[in-house]
Amino acid sequence: MPLSAERWRTLSPYLDEALDVDIGQRASWLAGIRSRDPQLAADLAMLLAEQQAIDDTGFLEGSVHIGAPDTPETSQCGQVLGSYRLVSQLGRGGMGSVWLAERCDGRFEGLAAVKLLNVAVAGRAMEERFRREGSILARVRHPHIAHLIDAGVSPAGQPYLVLEYVDGQSIDRYCDNRSLGIEARLRLFLDVLAAVAHAHANLVVHRDIKPGNVLVSVDGDVKLLDFGIAKLLESDTGLDGILQGASTLTRDAGSALTPLFAAPEQLTGESVTTATDVYALGVLLYVLLTGRHPTGGAVRSTATLVRAIVDEEPRRASDAVIRDEEAPDAHATRRCPTAARLSRTLRGDLDTIIAKALKKNPSERYSSVTALADDLRRYLSHEPIAARPESLRYRASTFVRRHTRGVAAFVAVTILLTGLAVYHTARLAAERDRAQREAAKATRVSELLTNMLTAADPYEARARQAEPTVRGLLDAGAVQVEQGLAGQPELRADILTVLGRIYRRLGIYDKAQSLLEQALASGITAFGSQHVTVAQTLHDLAVVLADKGDYEAAARRLEQALAMRRALLGAEHQDVAVTLSELGRVYQDLGLNQRAEPLQREALRIRTSVLGAGDRETAVSMSDLASVLRLNGDLTGAETLLTGCLDINRKTRGDIHPNTATTWHDLAQIAAARGDEATAESLMRRSLDINRQTLGGQHPVIATTLNSLAHVLVAQRRFDEAAASLEEALAIARPALGTDHQLTAIYTINLASVRLTQNKAIAAEQLLRQALPIRARAPNILPSRRRTMPEDDWSVAGIRTLLGRSLIAQGRYADAEAILLEARRDLDAQAPPRTRDVTATLTALVQLYDAWGRPDTAATYRALLPS
């Protein structure tokens, strides 16, 4: 019979003692207790007998073993049940067997899973439970729950259920086989929560949530299975007799549950509610994120497992991954590069979320599965979670109550260690001083952050006329760092580098460059010229210079940073891959694709090796290499890489993220290169929408995407829309990048070309005269080849030819002739000139002399046109 929690606590110490007694000596041991307390001895005898029986029947192995090497019931193979024919046995358990079946009525083809009740062991309660599973599945229909297709009784009188067949793996194996990161695992887990929440909304508690009952298909689709021991929360009324004999079913279900994932109240016979599923979900989440069970080594014995679940607090998830008898990195490397890094990721909010789900008292757990899901979404969105960690006082008092003898021993050891610490004080002075410096550093950082955030306090900021903005707080913080940390170069270098990186991501490049140059100077003062901090600042500064269009200076800085990182970190470090990737991008911006490709391939190899094939930084390298391949004309190779990159980005970063938007943009470029303008426009607009949501409306990346969209619109001869897109791009680029930036010039030239097509020659001329001096200053630099279209490769000769055409359209033939002949001289000086530029210039000269009434001269240039 089930034991109450209070009775269990009374028996638990005696059970510990019993398990230490040799099996042959237990009878005499029990006799001694029986003389003092007959009821206590009876309860202990019952528990020990059950424990032995459970061990003999494989208690820890669960109820159904899919794929276990049991002998299949071949006599049933080929049997037809309703519209389905049994093909092969998938698994077998106490209730019966599960078969793969195929549709055979000729109406359509399809596979299903058929669950057959084992008539050899079926009693009334078993039949009721089997019928109940069918009734439950009929009422819970959800995308992440394997749905009921049909039900019936075989000619031999064997009840069966026809269920959706899921070709997949258990969720833990799926995640481990793909080495999914923490965020990707959490997003899959949210699908599980959605399924369980739907079941709860229909008054169904699953009661057996475990990895084997959560499958993930090859397409990444989550399915919750096996409602065989589920419990309906409604009363009998209105359920058409489904709950007849409910008490019997509840008792029988206790032997079918899986102890590893059972809640304390299931093991002590108390009420089962939705909180029971919350606990099991907490265990599943713990296993997914750590690769270990919350009870640790207790799983090796049935009795110790049950005692641990009912009476012992689980280890924090962040501690479990580094404090275990197994090799610390055995499970961590499937989630993070090292156990230490995984522990840092789990520490804090995830520890708190898991701990709340695993509370012994159901009332202290999350009030619902939805509340648990909400906290996980807040974590993924970097928002404060609703759960709060237990206070130190509470945790300490609980620990002392549970481990009185251990605490006493700990106090004695502490006294001894204190004496040793006093003895070795002199030897530890250097470490103490270093710790004090770190503490002072942390204090200074805290003061800076406090001062920054005080600007948002309405009681402090009395002179403020408007609400503080993120930019305003950043500016205030930058001023404090620049002015207040002059005597602390180490701290100054660290904080200025972080601030510079943030300004760069906001598209505020001048401010970012200024801060990073100061950080570099402070870093060299604090650490010397060869240090990992200096290498990081050099790297970040180079990226800003590339954003500003100074690609040659950016390349020099990145080459320095790369050499430094290789020397300090080794050739296979992930930071080396980051700099390889950025240097490859800058080589592309300089038109040096052949130099860029080997760097991007090396970066991809390092990231795949160090971080894993499914890591989001690996996806960055896939995108970078795809850009090189696209510009080299390998559209198929580029598309393959980008498709894989998109899949990783959506799993690890989400659909609404700048990196996901970039991948959509690059796929749109491939569609445009193939002439599929409709697809290109759709993908480009998707990228634009995501960027606007994540970066705001005034980021330079928005301008680049608008420019690319304009090319697609021009190809569809939608010139008015293309012009509007380019005007918006210029409205963003001019204040963000400056009027002298190469990208600003490119957008201006593209708008001029559209205006000329619209027969607005004067507007086109004005735009071209603004852009020509900018491009003439850097004629060999193609701005940001990674993000722009091939049509943006405007040479100086090409711009002059476009200007000449605008003058022809105005009837200013002499001016047009001077510009076009100058373009011709530009081309003659190149070795060799591009065919498209030669064709454009000669065609414009033919148009000029035809319009000017000089047919002989026009014929001369027409003869020079490439055939």
Image (cartoon, rainbow, N blue to C red):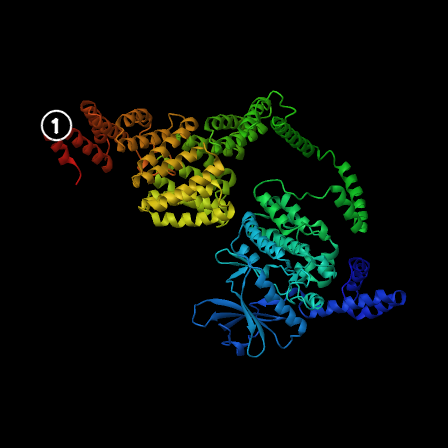
| Residue 527 visible here | no
Residue 797 location in percent, x, y? 25, 30
What's the amino acid at mark 1?
Gly
Image quadrant where residue 170 sits: bottom right
For this orientation, the residue located farthest to the front is: 238
Which of the 4 image quarters holds residue 547? top left
| Residue 537 percent coordinates (x, y) | 50, 32
Work out which quarter of the rendered image holds the C terminus and state it. Answer: top left
Tell me if residue 376 comes above or below residue 506 in the rendering.
below
Q: Nearer the viewer, residue 350 or 417?
A: 350
Q: Residue at x 65, y 24 (%)?
A: 460
Quarter containing the N terminus = bottom right
Residue ID at (50%, 55%): 220
Q: To which residue does mark 1 refer?
A: 853
> In the visual, does 759 lie left or right of 158?
left
Task: Tell me how many marks there are.
Answer: 1
Residue in front for this viewpoint, 271 or 16: 271
Pick the front one: 273 or 169: 273
Location of residue 234 with respect to 501 vertically, above or below: below
Q: In what element is the residue under mark 1?
A: loop
Does residue 407 appear anywhere in the picture? yes
Q: Residue 226: where, in percent of width, then height?
A: 59, 63
* Number of residues whose C-alpha sits closer than 10 Å to that of mark 1, classed few (under 14), some (14–19) or many (20 or more): few
Relative to residue 86, is residue 854 depicted above or below?
above
Taking 821 as reference, is 629 left or right? Answer: right
Residue 341 rendering spot, x and y as whole percentages: 59, 45
Q: Nearer the viewer, residue 634 or 197?
A: 197
Position of 425 with respect to 787 (left or right) is right
